[in-house]
């Protein structure tokens, strides 16, 4: 996961409601998803919510958070400190793109970045990304902007602090309602926020729908806080649907 203090993946935060639990039969649940493109676990959960969108009527909105901001002031290894320095650049570009063209560009740009960060990265035997094979963030952003049909000059935002105020505002809007000791992804669904689900493979079709409905049911219990077990495998990027 990208947990707090580790930064790459504590899991998502979500708010859910289904037709069975919602007293408003014609209501379409609003799902707000916070992400940092650097997190592999967040990437898998984001691909799952896109699968959910195919089988459930949801109103999906994307938002940025920052692992760099999340881990400020924490005791991190030198390698992880360097990773956090690199991670903020692409997030700044996402914020700049949103400011110029609107929130609707976040989804396509995140998909373009995430595909290049996670899907094409060399992997270890268990399918998890090779931590020693780090792609160049600037190259990823340049190619992602082109793939998303956005102006190349947005690359300048990578090194600019002009977008940090908006970045932090988006970050805290998503993270503060969840509380401390969580990471990404975070989702808010119809006003209830939580961290997770953390998945190593992307469910599709009926499985995606069942996972969503289960998360919704738990999210609607005001006294539910955590359900967890030890992970036995890394992110399996070959389970990400190609469509």
Image: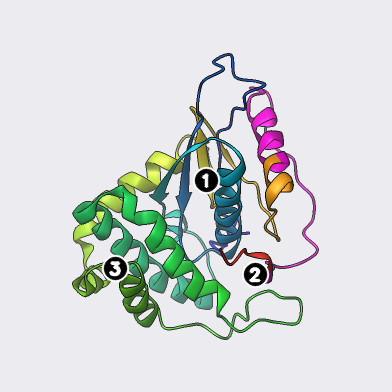
Query: Residue 44: where, in percent of width, then height?
Result: 60, 59
Q: Residue at horizontal 47%, vertical 73%?
A: 83
Mark 2: give few (<14), some (14-19) or many (20+) Cα within 10 Å: many
Q: Secondary structure at mark 1?
A: strand
Describe residue 219's horizontal placement relative to residue 156 as left or right: right
Q: Earlier in the sequence, mark 2 or mark 1?
A: 1
Stretch in magenta: 210-238
Q: Quadrant of residue 55?
A: top right
- Distance, label 1 to label 3, CA atoms, is 27 Å
Q: Quadrant of residue 217?
A: top right
Q: Residue at horizontal 47%, vertical 34%?
A: 177
Q: Secondary structure at mark 2?
A: helix
Query: Residue 187: where, in percent of width, then height?
Result: 52, 41
- Residue nearest the observer in this picture, 49 or 242: 242
Disc 2 vs disc 3: which is toward the camera?
3
Residue 148 visible in the snapshot: yes
- Distance, label 2 to label 1, CA atoms, is 20 Å
Q: Earlier in the sequence, mark 2 or mark 3?
A: 3
- Distance, label 2 to label 3, CA atoms, is 25 Å
Q: Earlier in the sequence, mark 1 or mark 3?
A: 3
Q: Which mark is residue 204?
A: none
Describe residue 69's horizontal placement relative to residue 14 as left or right: left
Q: Residue 128 colored magenta?
A: no
- Residue nearest the observer in this picture, 126 or 115: 115
The residue identified by callout 3 is: 149
Mark 3: give few (<14), some (14-19) or many (20+) Cα within 10 Å: few
Residue 73 visible in the snapshot: no
Q: Which mark is residue 186?
A: 1
Mark 2 touching mark 1, by CB under 8 A?
no
The residue identified by callout 2 is: 237
Q: Quadrant of residue 84?
A: bottom left
Disc 1 vs disc 3: which is toward the camera?
3
């Amino acid at each position: 996961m990208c947990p707090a203090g580790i930064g790459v993946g504590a899991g998502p935060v979500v708010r859910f409601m289904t037709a069975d639990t919602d007293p408003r039969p014609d209501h379409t649940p609003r799902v707000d998803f916070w992400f940092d493109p650097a997190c592999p676990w967040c990437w898998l959960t984001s691909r799952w919510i896109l699968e959910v969108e195919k089988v459930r009527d949801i109103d999906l909105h994307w938002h940025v958070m920052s692992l760099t901001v999340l881990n400020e002031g924490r005791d991190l290894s030198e390698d992880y400190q360097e990773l956090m320095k690199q991670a903020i650049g692409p997030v700044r570009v996402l914020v700049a793109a949103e400011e110029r063209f609107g929130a609707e560009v976040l989804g396509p740009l995140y998909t373009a970045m995430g595909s290049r960060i996670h899907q094409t990265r060399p992997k270890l035997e268990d399918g998890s990304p090779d931590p020693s094979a780090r792609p160049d963030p600037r190259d990823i952003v340049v190619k992602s902007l082109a793939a998303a049909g956005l102006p190349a000059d947005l690359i300048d935002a990578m090194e600019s602090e002009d977008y940090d105020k908006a970045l932090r505002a988006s970050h805290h809007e998503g993270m503060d309602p969840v509380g401390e000791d969580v990471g990404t992804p975070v989702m808010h669904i119809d006003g209830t926020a939580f961290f997770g689900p953390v998945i190593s493979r992307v469910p599709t079709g009926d499985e995606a729908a069942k996972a969503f409905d289960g998360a919704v049911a738990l999210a609607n219990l005001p006294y539910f806080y955590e359900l967890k077990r030890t992970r036995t495998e890394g992110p399996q990027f070959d389970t990400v649907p190609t469509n």
